[in-house]
Image (cartoon, rainbow, N blue to C red):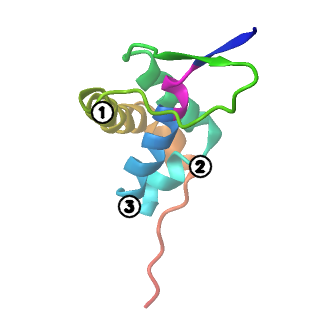
Amino acid sequence: MLADIINITLPVVVKEIEIVLDGYPHHPYQQAFATPHLRQKLITYVLSQVPAHYRVYESSSVYGGFEGLSLEEHLQVEVLIRQGIQHILCDNAQWASRHIPEAVSVG
């Protein structure tokens, strides 16, 4: 019987990034991390600092949810995402100022 080994850390990190960014203002945070360039940097930043978790699935089974991280690990991922957002925006401030339009208020 064949089995697949799946890294469940990546989908958890990607999902948590979406959740965390939803709590940030659209400009500049959501706009900046909507770009693949900075989104990938954020994913890499977080993944480089958390242990990878794997699940073994039988080849005939359907992949279930990607739970598997403890509450403490989820909180660690959230903190790393918030740190990563600040770190990456700071490191890429010039790029962001050129590629992310300023918010314009009407009135």
Mark in front: 3 vs 2: 3
96 drawn magenta: no
Corner quadrant of residue 76: top left
Q: Is residue 105 above or below residue 23?
A: below
- Residue 28: percent from the left, percent from the top? 44, 55
Q: Secondary structure at mark 3?
A: loop
Q: Residue at x 45, y 33 (%)?
A: 67
Corner quadrant of residue 40: top right
Residue marked by disc 3: 25
Q: Determine contact: label 1, label 3, CB under 8 Å.
A: no
Q: Determine contact: label 3, label 2, CB under 8 Å.
A: no
Look at the magenta stretch and give its main secondary structure.
Answer: helix
Q: CA distance from mark 1 to mark 3?
A: 16 Å
- Residue 80: percent from the left, percent from the top? 32, 30
Residue marked by disc 2: 99
- Residue 30: percent from the left, percent from the top? 48, 54
Mark in front: 1 vs 2: 1
Task: Check disc 2 and give the amino acid type.
Answer: His
Q: Residue at x 46, y 33 (%)?
A: 13
- Residue 15: percent from the left, percent from the top? 49, 42
Residue marked by disc 1: 83
